[in-house]
Amino acid sequence: MRRLLDARTGGLLALALIIALLPLILPNKFYYDVAIKTALNALVCVGLNLLIGYAGQISLGHAGFFALGGYASAVLTARYQWNGFAAMAVGMAGVGLLAFIVARPILRLRGHYLAMATLGLGIIIAIVLNREIPITGGPDGMTVPALRLGEWRLIGTTTWYWISGGVLLIAVWLALNLIDSGVGRALRALHGSEVAAETVGIDTTRYKVLIFVISAVFASLAGSLFAHAERFITPTEAGFMRSIEFVTMVVLGGMASTYGAVVGAAILTVLPQLLTKLHDYEHLAFGAVLILVMIFMPKGLVPTLQNRLRHLVGGQPR
Amino acid sequence: MSVLTVENLSKGFGGVQAVAELSFSITEKRIHSIIGPNGAGKTTLFNLITGIYTPSSGRISLLGDDITGLPTAARAARGIQRTFQNLQIFFNMTALENVMVGRHLSLRPRLLPSLLRLPASARADRETEAQAADLMAYVGLGKWLDADADAMPYGALKRLEIARALAARPRLLLLDEPAAGLNAVETAEIDELIKRIAAGGTTVVLVEHDMKLVMGVSDHILVLDYGRKLADGTAAEVRANPDVIRAYLGAGAA
């Protein structure tokens, strides 16, 4: 039983099984599309959780990185006839570079400063995407060509279901590897005690910048895949509310839990789709979820449930 | 040989001179203690030596190299480690992981091998784990290997900080009140541990209020009062020094 609860082996297997078996109960295209959005949101959240949950830093601008990735793919393939994979890679590299340039000065500061700076960055990105109409199409958004692999056009919800599911699985594997390595321990250490981390020789600024860049690159990749999967992108993807949604997903699922990030993304992507009649109250609901989780389950859904389960099977509570 | 040399070191906080014109040196492979009344500047001195504070003036050198301007992490790389009076444990990790973090400088983790969990990276991690487990046994925490740090009692956490500091294989180990809050039995164990660490070739500097412990283990004692050096020497010399008696017991006692 302990073995099954082991994050690395059991969890990855369970996630792979869920992704493999889910199509059996997905009735139509609409649900496939929800599943794709879930996987791509989860991809952002797995990266964001490395930053928020493990390294203890906050970003309120990850939707900006997501949208930049999406627009890099959209603009380079639609207007400049680039190969989709090259555009995706350039998007990731560009977003990584932007995150690095922004993070270097900010991450010397602590707490609220990073939140404010990333908030500002997200808003600037949204404004640029809205205003640069000749390039981005402005508020109306733009259509995105299909991603091509040789002669094969990657289109259709089923194809994209497997692509996004596969990428998510790999991302989870990478995140789990990272957390359980010297790099991951350094990140968790600077979260636990920055002064002690410095004292044992960890260059905390460097590690904060590193994880900020990695999480931004995850978001950029998710944005690129989103653009190709939906074949359409608008600047609302860069909006402040989208950034808040990502943070809420991470907090709900459980900070410092990679599977928590996936579960949080799943719940908060699927619920609004099923409750479309209550669309007007969506933001209210996100706010309420954030507050309730903070009060009743400050560790988030997955860690809290894991604890209960471990307790039940008689293991060490953690 | 002198491991650490402090020359004319001063640190002021607004109007308060926490450390003033302080000069002393720490010789290798011995146990040094820094004592003094509360507020004498002992912890401030540790914070200056480890680079957590920047001095107002003065110079700190390690093995002859000026380290006054170096950041904390760079000083760690040169062999300075410390523990904290108010524990600085990574409470979001297990006890073993806390000690593994102490191996950071020798492990030198790299991003790509870590992300992909390449065999070399995984092997280095397993070695680090084994070394950390050995160190936990060394400080007497053998039964806490799998414990989460936030589930451990205070006395065990004190040792955990020592194990984490030792994991970096320091040349100079600064212990800030390792016996504070411990009972007599635990203090005796810490006493024995400090002697073992010094015998292993690490220079130990101790800030401590437990005089029995200080007098018992120290080869050399530095007495601070209001950030200034009041006296230094062996335990017997310090104990007989009239200035020390006056500072500790009041003017009438001298």
Image: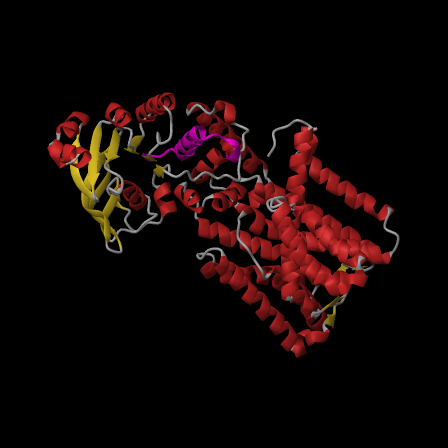
Residue B120 lies, in percent from the top left, at 55, 36
Drawn side of residue B206 relative to residue A241, left or right:
left
Main SS of the magenta part reads helix
Label count reads: 0
> Is residue B65 within the magenta segment?
no
**Camera-side residue: A308 or B109?**
A308
Q: Which residues are magenta?
A: B150-174
Q: Is residue A8 visible?
A: no
From this view, report whether residue B205 is shown above or below residue A204.
Answer: above
Residue plotted at (45% across, 49% down): A204
In which image quadrant can residue B15 be found?
bottom left
> Is residue B167 within the magenta segment?
yes
Residue plotted at (21% across, 30% down): B220
Residue plotted at (32% across, 49% down): B53
Residue B152 lies, in percent from the top left, at 50, 30
Residue A242 lies, in percent from the top left, at 66, 62
Most extreme residue toward the right, as rendered? Answer: A27
**Camera-side residue: A78 or A231?**
A231
Residue A63 lies, in percent from the top left, at 63, 62
